[in-house]
């Protein structure tokens, strides 16, 4: 079987390709050229990543292709992210990248190019259901599990996808890379924004939006406590980066994008900080709307799994949860199966 492997130049995709070669697949590596723009003080690592992918492809004796998706990526992921931040929401570009690029554009391009399946280095598990549909399950490594970022992938796309790392722990993957002498065995995992590496969100957004300074206001007393560099850069629940002096920490509990004001409180029990119901928009279900009563949801990457019920685009949490963030995703599970989810509306 002819499998095209998305090779990012990292250790996970390198081991993915190696395992598939060893399992007898006809493997072609593909580097997705999504972003190449440097930012002030920050060099985009794409050229180094491509060089690493090439080194591993040579080691494995497989061809490596480059798919240039820069235009589509800018339109489908970057522009979406910027638009969401402008409204005051906090989006997750990794989720949109998976939905629009890796498991749509890459999949479609690879299939048209002769692939029968695609594979990536995601930590997740796909299983075929009794009716032949593809179902998504959490990975063996609970700390590396990436189903939170994959919940918007369709069942049809999952049916054409292999996740060879789903049953391994990250430590095992590192060991397998070392045992095989792969060039990326000791390469650190990428951090920061998915497509520009270690650059911070403030530095990135600063290239595309004009952010004006404004007031940081105590929610209870309405007292101006300090100044901020732009309300767009702040997230509900945030406590770092406020520069409001000593004493008990302040938390961001709200913001007004029109007035360009950020509202804070020292009261962790402030009404805006806790929710028992979470309204969702743009819901997506991998195999249909869940009808089960016993569900759990994750409201942020690596957040706790929260017992809940779902009905008509509303999550009803069994216990109050602090600092839900508009624009982030609520991902819903039945036991270890990822059913889908939606974007937190407010």
Image (tube, rainbow, N blue to C red):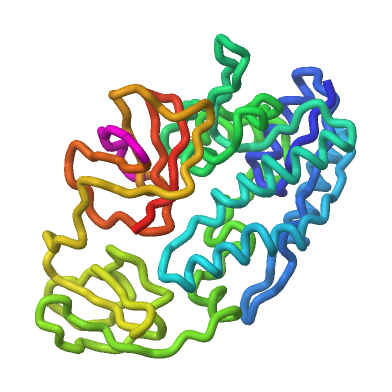
| Residue at 19 percent of width and 54 percent of height | 274
The kind of secondary structure the magenta stretch mainly shows is: strand
The answer to if 264 sits in the magenta stretch is no
Q: Is residue 310 magenta?
A: yes
Q: Residue at x 59, y 79 (%)?
A: 208
Q: In this view of the protein, can residue 21 be seen by the observer?
A: yes
Q: Is residue 97 left or right of residue 61?
A: left
Looking at the rendering, which quadrant does residue 224 occupy?
Answer: bottom left
- Residue extending farthest to the top is 130
**Residue 272 vertical position relative to residue 62 in the rendered view, above or below:** below
Q: Is residue 183 visible?
A: no
Q: Quadrant of residue 17?
A: top right
Observer-nearest of 124 and 310:
310
Q: Quadrant of residue 13?
A: top right
The one nearer the camera, 84 or 144, is 84
Q: What residue lies at 60% left-to-right and 28% top-to-bottom?
A: 155
Position of the C terminus, as image quadrant, is: bottom left
Q: Position of residue 302 (x, y in %)?
A: 38, 44
Indicate the position of residue 250 as horizontal and vertical percent values: 20, 72
Is 253 rendered above or below residue 294?
A: below
Q: Residue at x 58, y 11 (%)?
A: 131
Q: Quadrant of the N terminus?
A: top right
Farthest residue to the front: give it. 312
Query: Relative to 233, is 280 above or below?
Result: above
Counting labels gives 0
Instruction: Report x, y in % for residue 262.
Output: 29, 78
Magenta segment: 303-312
């Amino acid at each position: 079987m002819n499998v095209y492997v998305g090779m990012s130049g990292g250790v996970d995709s390198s081991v993915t390709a190696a395992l598939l070669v060893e399992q007898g697949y006809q493997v072609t590596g593909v580097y997705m050229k999504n972003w190449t723009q440097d930012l002030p003080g920050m060099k985009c690592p794409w050229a180094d990543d491509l060089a690493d992918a090439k080194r591993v492809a040579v080691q494995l004796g497989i061809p490596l292709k480059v798919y240039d998706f820069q235009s589509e990526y800018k339109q489908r992921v970057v522009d979406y992210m910027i638009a969401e931040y402008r409204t005051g929401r906090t989006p997750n570009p990794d989720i949109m990248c998976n939905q629009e690029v890796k498991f749509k554009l890459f999949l479609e391009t690879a299939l048209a190019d002769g692939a029968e399946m695609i594979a990536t280095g995601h930590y997740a598990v796909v299983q075929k259901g009794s009716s032949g549909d593809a179902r998504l399950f959490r990975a063996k490594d609970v700390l590396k599990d990436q189903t939170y970022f994959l919940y918007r992938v369709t069942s049809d796309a999952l049916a054409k996808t292999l996740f060879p790392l789903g049953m391994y722990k990250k430590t095992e993957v590192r060991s397998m890379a070392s045992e095989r002498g792969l060039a990326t065995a000791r390469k650190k995992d990428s951090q920061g924004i998915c497509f520009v590496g270690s650059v911070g969100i403030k530095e990135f957004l600063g290239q595309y939006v004009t952010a004006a300074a404004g007031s940081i206001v105590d929610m209870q007393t309405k007292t101006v406590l300090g100044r901020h560099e732009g309300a767009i850069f702040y997230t509900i629940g945030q406590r770092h980066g406020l520069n409001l002096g000593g004493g008990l920490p302040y938390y961001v509990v709200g913001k007004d994008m029109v007035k360009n004001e950020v509202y804070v409180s020292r009261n962790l029990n402030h009404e805006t900080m806790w929710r028992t119901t979470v309204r969702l928009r743009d819901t997506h279900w991998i195999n249909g709307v869940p009808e089960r009563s016993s569900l759990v949801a994750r409201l942020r990457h690596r957040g706790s799994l929260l017992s809940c019920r779902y009905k008509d685009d509303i999550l009803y949490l069994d216990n109050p949860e602090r600092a839900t963030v508009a624009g982030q995703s609520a991902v819903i599970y039945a036991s270890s199966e990822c059913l889908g989810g939606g974007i937190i509306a407010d």
